[in-house]
């Protein structure tokens, strides 16, 4: 289906899709916030903009996941657009092999992990930024770059005219109810991002997936609760030593979380590893290697 622009203010719109694209407009020129999964989506975006006589002039990527930067290559090919991205996300956008490589524990990933959902078409990042809540100026555009790390190392929210494009810091209740395990690479930083988002007063908060919210605070609470559930599960189930895979497997069978592909396994496992690492950083969990396995144990057991 051909999507159409939905306007949130006179000059800020979004293109609704499995991954929303933000459209920041100045005099019929637009910066696009994220580009969707692939070439097909990029072509649909071009048509949606043409229908409103808007010319895309640049791309900002909130982070490097394939479903957010996969349309870059086609937009660069057809329109020669510059791409701006957070400094730490740039290498992954330019060489998407790194995404699957990282997920597979820095070993060469099997072909099944190198699918288009985990490995976008590469694109060239022409400029990098450090998100620090300062105003980023480019041509006639003035945008606040809000640091929202945790889901990915340097995920950035894009704030323009009281509309925040929040990327994947907030996942929808429907997703969380079904899958239970949000993907994060750093749970402590992600939690901090959720807290600061809660305090951020904006007119609209547009998540990467789902519909824009006028009040995003209930969603922040739901996303915090998802983190608490996993942290508590890990601490309860490490009263005696356990391997990370055991913890994940028990969690999935207890809550009926479906896991059928190697991609799902590695996404969930990486999220669980991020929880274990975060709990270790907080002094609540310890790890030791014994008989060739890495074992985790709640810290109170060692005191
Ligand atoms: Zn993402």
Image: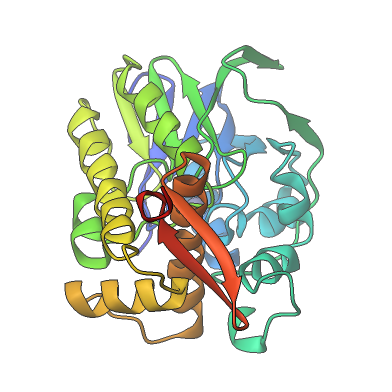
Say left or right for 72 vs 176.
Answer: right
Q: Position of residue 115 (x, y in %)?
A: 59, 78
Residue at 54%, 70% (x, y): give it: 117
Q: Position of residue 215 (x, y in %)?
A: 20, 26
Whether 160 is drawn above or below 94: the answer is above
Say left or right for 291 vs 1.
Answer: right
Residue 56, located in which quarter of the rendered image?
A: top right
Say left or right for 290 vs 262.
Answer: right
Whether 153 is drawn above or below 162: the answer is below
Residue at 19%, 75% (x, y): give it: 254
- Tell me, yes or no, if residue 251 can be seen here: yes
- Tell me, yes or no, if residue 37 can be seen here: no
Looking at the picture, tell me which residue is in the foreground, 201 or 179.
179
Residue at the extreme front:
303
Q: Position of residue 292 (x, y in %)?
A: 63, 82
Q: Position of residue 90 (x, y in %)?
A: 75, 46
Residue 39, located in which quarter of the rendered image?
A: bottom right
Residue at 19%, 57% (x, y): give it: 174
Looking at the picture, tell me which residue is in the foreground, 242 or 67.
242
Residue at 61%, 12% (x, y): give it: 134
Residue 140, located in which quarter of the rendered image?
A: top right
């Amino acid at each position: 289906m051909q999507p159409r622009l939905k306007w949130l203010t006179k000059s800020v719109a979004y293109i609704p899709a499995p991954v929303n694209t933000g459209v920041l407009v100045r005099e019929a020129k637009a910066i696009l916030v994220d580009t969707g999964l692939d070439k097909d989506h990029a072509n649909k975006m071009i048509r949606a903009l043409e229908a409103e006589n808007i010319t895309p002039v640049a791309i900002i990527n909130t982070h490097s996941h394939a479903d957010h930067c996969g349309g870059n290559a086609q937009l660069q090919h057809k329109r020669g657009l510059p791409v701006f991205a957070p400094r730490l996300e740039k290498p992954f956008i330019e060489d998407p092999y790194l995404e699957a490589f990282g997920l597979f524990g820095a070993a060469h990933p099997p072909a099944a992990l190198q699918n288009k959902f985990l490995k976008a078409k590469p694109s060239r990042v022409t400029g990098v930024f450090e998100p620090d809540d300062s105003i980023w100026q480019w041509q006639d555009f003035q945008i606040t770059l809000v640091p929202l790390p945790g889901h990915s190392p340097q995920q950035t929210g894009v704030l323009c005219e009281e509309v925040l494009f929040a990327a994947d810091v907030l996942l929808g209740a429907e997703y969380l109810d079904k899958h239970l395990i949000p993907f994060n690479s750093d749970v402590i930083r992600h939690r901090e991002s959720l807290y600061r988002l809660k305090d951020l007063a904006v007119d609209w908060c547009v998540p990467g997936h789902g519909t824009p919210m006028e009040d995003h605070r209930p969603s922040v609470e739901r996303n915090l609760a998802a983190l608490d559930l996993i942290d508590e599960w890990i601490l309860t189930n490490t009263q005696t030593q356990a391997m990370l895979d055991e913890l994940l497997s028990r969690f999935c069978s207890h809550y009926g979380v479906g896991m059928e592909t190697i991609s799902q396994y590695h996404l969930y496992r990486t999220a669980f590893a991020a929880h274990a690492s975060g709990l270790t950083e907080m002094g609540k969990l310890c790890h030791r290697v014994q008989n060739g396995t890495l074992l985790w144990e709640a810290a109170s057991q060692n005191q």
